[in-house]
Amino acid sequence: MERKEMKYHKNDKVRCAVKCKHESCPWKVILRFNKDDKCWRLSVVKDKHDGCVRTQNNSMVNSSIVAKRWKQQIRGNLEWKTNSFLEKILTDDHYILSKKQAWRALVKEKVKVSDLKENGKERFLRMYICWEATREGFKHCRKIIGLDGCHLKCKIGGQLLTAVGIDANESLFPIAYAVVEDKQKGLIQACESTLQGVRHIFCVRHLHNNMRVAGFTANAIKDALWKAARATTVNNFSTALLELRKLDENAYVWLGDKDEIKDF
Ligand SMILES: [Zn+2]
């Protein structure tokens, strides 16, 4: 608050001594742990600075401190970008923070916590991560985004949602990921509203998995499905789909309900 920089001289289990970083300044606070009372006690307080200067670069002002100080503002402004946040800290608090630390502070406060509290404590709900480096890297990838989700098998559960691209080496290129509380339902609706006019297709392996769950488990159906998926001409695709229809009319109808197949 006073824009002075302090330094820990001692910080262990029994002593904590903080002094002004400016050598000749008398400001200091010393705490000692009282074993009998099991509590910390102030033993020295010299709360007056003298001869030191205010600083804009303060090593004590780290991302945690900044996150705590700006908590409310960050939560009400989730679109805040690192650079404009940095400017705000400089104009309001007169501190120069590194871009990395400002970014960390934003991330720390941008994790969505649950409205329901447990034992008075806030609980993690969801968060989304997209690294700047991967966002830049994706510009050099093919214009394909793969979306998927899986269950997290840790104690609190939840789902991990991922968005990947394909790089020049035909390898998966992670773009963004999120940990959410709910299932990935709504993915198709979300694609339709946010990626208008962009063609979307299903992963055949997942499509077949869903077919199996729906009761179409025969290997012949699987083969026919893959044949249709691998077809490079409309004619070949139609022929393969007809083969599938001959095998199981219901499987054909089930596939027909999927928007992607309808387009053909
Ligand atoms: Zn001082």
Image (tube, rainbow, N blue to C red):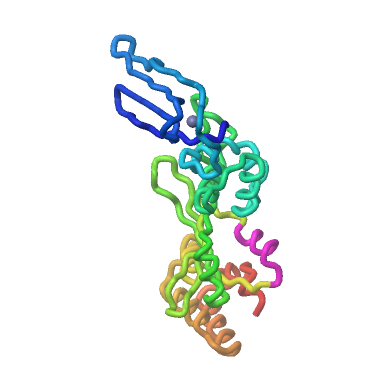
What's the residue at 50%, 34% (across, down)? Answer: 52
Residue 21 location, x and y as percent? 43, 35
Residue 30: quadrant of the picture: top left
Would you say residue 211 is visible in this rendering?
no
Q: Is residue 14 visible?
A: yes
Q: Is residue 206 above or below residue 179?
A: below
Q: Does the segment drawn in magenta span residue 38? A: no
The tally of labels here is 0
Quadrant of image for the N terminus: top right
* Majority SS type along the magenta span: helix
Question: Which residue occupies 67% across, 66% down?
Answer: 195
Name the residue furthest top.
36
In this rendering, would 256 be left or right of 162? right
Q: Nearer the viewer, residue 41 or 70?
A: 41
User: Is 191 a magenta residue?
Assistant: yes
Q: Quadrant of the C terminus?
A: bottom right
Q: Nearer the viewer, residue 231 or 74?
A: 74
Q: In the rendered structure, which segment of residues is drawn in magenta? A: 187-197
Q: Position of residue 184 (x, y in %)?
A: 55, 54
In the figure, 76 relative to 264: above or below?
Answer: above
